[in-house]
């Protein structure tokens, strides 16, 4: 799973999504570290996860402005 590849495609249609590349990169890293345990694990704090969750909510609102979260 590589969210940046999907975001590359989405940015073609909605350029303002490019502000979410760092978020997608971090989330892809979380997935890979969990999926392939020999990779170094992240020392995530509750605060780190909370920040990423808030940014992900912004991302979802940009993608789906008509939806209620």
Image (cartoon, rainbow, N blue to C red):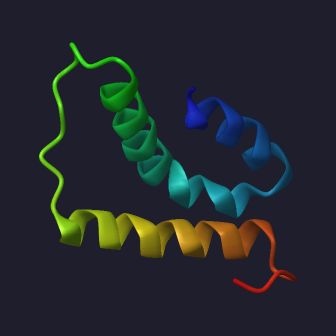
**Residue at horizontal 20%, vertical 68%?**
46
Q: Is residue 29 left or right of residue 6?
A: left
Q: Position of residue 56 (x, y in %)?
A: 53, 65
Q: Position of residue 7 (x, y in %)?
A: 66, 42
**Residue at horizontal 68%, vertical 63%?**
16
Query: In this view of the protein, which residue sits in the foreground, 55 or 11?
Result: 55
Question: Which image quarter holds the N terminus?
Answer: top right
Q: Which residue is situated farthest in the top direction here? A: 38
Q: Position of residue 49 (x, y in %)?
A: 30, 63
Query: In this view of the protein, which residue sits in the foreground, 50 or 23?
Result: 50
Q: Which residue is situated farthest in the left direction here? A: 43
Question: Which image quarter holds the C terminus?
Answer: bottom right
Is 58 placed above or below 34 here?
Answer: below
Query: Which quadrant of the structure image shows residue 8?
Result: top right
Q: Position of residue 20 (x, y in %)?
A: 53, 56
Is 55 placed above or below 37 here?
Answer: below
Is 52 placed above or below 10 here?
Answer: below
Query: Which quadrant of the structure image shows residue 64?
Result: bottom right
- What is the total number of numbered labels drawn onto the structure image? 0
Q: Is residue 33 left or right of residue 23?
A: left
**Residue at horizontal 40%, vertical 24%?**
35
Query: In this view of the protein, which residue sits in the foreground, 35 or 24?
Result: 35
Q: Is residue 50 left or right of residue 20?
A: left
**Residue at horizontal 43%, vertical 40%?**
25
């Amino acid at each position: 799973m590589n969210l940046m590849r999907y975001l590359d495609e989405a940015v073609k249609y909605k350029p303002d999504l490019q502000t979410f590349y760092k978020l997608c990169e971090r989330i892809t890293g979380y997935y890979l570290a969990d999926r392939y345990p020999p990779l170094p694990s992240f020392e995530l704090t509750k605060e780190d996860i909370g920040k990423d969750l808030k940014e992900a909510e912004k991302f979802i609102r940009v993608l789906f402005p008509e939806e209620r979260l």
